[in-house]
Image (cartoon, grey):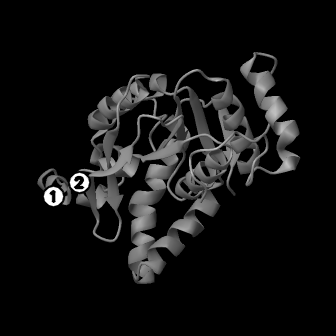
Amino acid sequence: MGGDGGARRPGGPGLGRGAGGAVERAARAEAGQGALSSPLTPEALGQELARRAGAASRRMVVAIAGPPGAGKSTLVDQLQAALRADGLPTQILPMDGFHYDNAILDARGLRHRKGAPESFDACGLIRLLQALANPEAPDIAVPVFDRAADLSRGSARIIPAQTRVLLAEGNYLLLDRAPWNALRPLADVTVMLDCPLEVLEARLMRRWLALGLPETEARARVEGNDLPNARLVLAESAPAALRVSTR
């Protein structure tokens, strides 16, 4: 992965040349000249974010939402690498760092619904994103979810003051219900991942099986928790400015 420094290079590594038309459509939509008729590719999204960040006079906050299994983590890793290669210091803020501890979930009877909106500290995420969106923000420490340990680690990542692009990612960043709907106004750009439900189901099954769960238990988790969360994201998220296909 390239460093944060260096001169900005148009169409840097990781940003495909074939994305130009999609980027032009996104620019026209932003200017009120028409809505996007189809999702962007990840490469076109990277070019569009680089264009907007290059024109911005302050840090740009990007909220990237999508159902579980849509590929948010993979996408933001790719975007971070491409934007850094384009000379834009970029950091990632994962929503998963705001999971309540299992002890809290147990006390509230929510362990079986871990990953649902009520299993997150949404208000803590809102407060932190408000601080990070401040143009005068100093270095700020943020929590990161440790999947192997199944817990969040506080102050596990630093968002430096010189960050130009902050990629916030998570299932519920565009959820149109309180308190989650306080997040959307904090973002300069909103993005929703576009992925069919049947593809999500297959990916989620593979995820649990890769973690060593028996097929019956993996199926129970997917059908009892993951898919209801996915349907909620698809049904109750506010419209995003940009969509990207991860199918």
Q: Is residue 35 visible?
A: no
Q: Position of residue 6 (x, y in %)?
A: 64, 44
Q: Name above or below for residue 200 compared with residue 95.
A: below
Farthest residue to the top: give it.
32
Residue closest to the eye, 201 or 82: 82
Residue 227: x and y, percent? Answer: 48, 57
Q: CA distance from mark 1 to mark 2?
A: 6 Å
Graded by Cα atoms within 10 Å as few (under 14), some (14 to 19) or many (20 or more), the crowding at tag 1 reads few
At a point 45% along the width and 65% down the height, the residue shown is 222
Task: Work out whether 182 lies above or below 223.
Answer: above
The secondary element bearing badge 1 is classed as: helix
- What residue is disc 1 on? 106
- Badges 1 and 2: C-beta atoms under 8 Å apart? yes
Relative side of 53 to 175, left or right: right
Residue 103, percent from left and from top: 14, 58
Q: Is label 2 in a helix, a strand or a loop?
A: loop
- Residue indicated by mark 2: 110
Is 123 left, or right, of 38 in this rendering?
A: left
Q: Residue at x 82, y 30 (%)?
A: 25
